Image: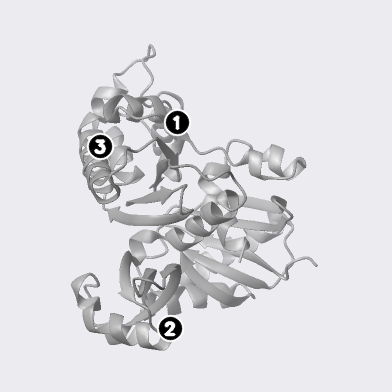
Amino acid sequence: MASSAFTLDIGERYIKVVDAEMSGSSIVAHSAAFSDLEFNPYVTAADDYIKKTSIAVQKLLSDAQIHKKEVHIVVPDSQSYTRIFEMPLLTEKELLSAIRYQADQFIPIPIEKVSMDIYPLRKDKQKGQSLILLVAAPTTMIDHVSQIVTGAGLTPISVENETSAALRFLGKIYEKKETTDELHIYINFGESSTSLYLYSLREKIPMQVHNFSIGRNIFFKDVMANLTITPEQAKEALEKVGFLPVQAPYNLPLIISAPFNEFVEEIKRFVISSQEMSARNINKVHVFGEGSAFAGIDAKLAEALGIAVEVSNLEPYFKKNSVVEYFAHDWNILLPAVGACLQ
């Protein structure tokens, strides 16, 4: 039976819609679309921003020919808080109560102003421990996106962040794969921040997550500050020249070297922490999100990290059809939106 809901990913740069579902061991994509926003919808909760975003959502749905009214909402990791940690084996109600006592250690706003969800990842009855994914977001932000969605004539049925949606996607694709001892890192190279996920192919669960405030927009601003070009030309330069050693009127890799070096240092710290925690080496790194569109990002990261790096390719996990083929080069940007459809 086809799902009655689709996903709307309200990003800081793009709005994205995906209508997809699992069919056996493959994903069937019915429709997808994404569009640039002229503004960041999270900058303000002003009514005119909400209305403009609602109108943009309606247009995108019309373009994608999605007529469903129920929607799963995905919000950026930069607008939420995520953590993986071990807790004693408790009921969900007891877990939430226990977590609230220590939430101020990693949530910088009053706990009464936060909405939280917990996702059990692993239970060890012998040790009496459970591994928990906690996702929290300000209630004001959730109200904000809910107003955008209802303003577009839709009914929200869930709200989650990019991390929980992306990790659901990984869980589905690894569920029936051969178990190995490999550890992979997934980099969600977002607009204003980046999230790192350590994923174990042995346990088939995430082991560690980390978010930091370096994203595509810092690279974009450096290009705009150093070259006399339009925003569209800067976007094209990053996506066609990027880190590639090609002949160009300007040395783009040098221009964006400062944010790249900071970006790599954060990832290196995560790699070291992951290897110390697991006593295993990292076998591969995958990149998705807005920044994964930078030309040559995979080779540049592989050189800097000394680990095999690839831009995430989602095509093998879909049943082939015209939608999958049309978005062949864009699924790496749409990955969290796909993951949200699989609940």
State the SS at label 1: helix
**Quarter the C terminus occupies:** bottom right
Left or right, 334 with respect to 41, comes to: right
Report the residue at 30% width, 55% height from top: 211
Q: Residue 276: x and y, percent?
A: 23, 46
* Label pair 2/1, CB-CB below 8 angstroms: no
State the SS at label 2: helix
* Label pair 1/3, CB-CB below 8 angstroms: no
Residue type pointed to by label 3: Val
User: Measured along the vertical axis of the image, is residue 146 above or below residue 196?
Assistant: below
Report the residue at 30% width, 35% height from top: 224
Give the residue number, with chain letter if any, for mark 1: 239
- In front: label 1 or label 3: 3
Q: Earlier along the polypeptide chain: callout 1 or callout 3?
A: 1
* Of residues 323 and 39, the one drawn nearer to the viewer in this rendering: 323
Q: CA distance from mark 3 to mark 2?
A: 37 Å
Q: Quadrant of residue 309?
A: top left
Q: CA distance from mark 2 to mark 1?
A: 44 Å
- In front: label 3 or label 2: 2
- In front: label 2 or label 1: 2
Q: Which mark is residue 92?
A: 2
Report the residue at 61% width, 72% height from top: 152
Q: Residue 118: x and y, percent?
A: 42, 74
State the SS at label 3: helix
Q: Which mark is residue 264?
A: 3
* Of residues 277 and 258, the one drawn nearer to the viewer in this rendering: 277
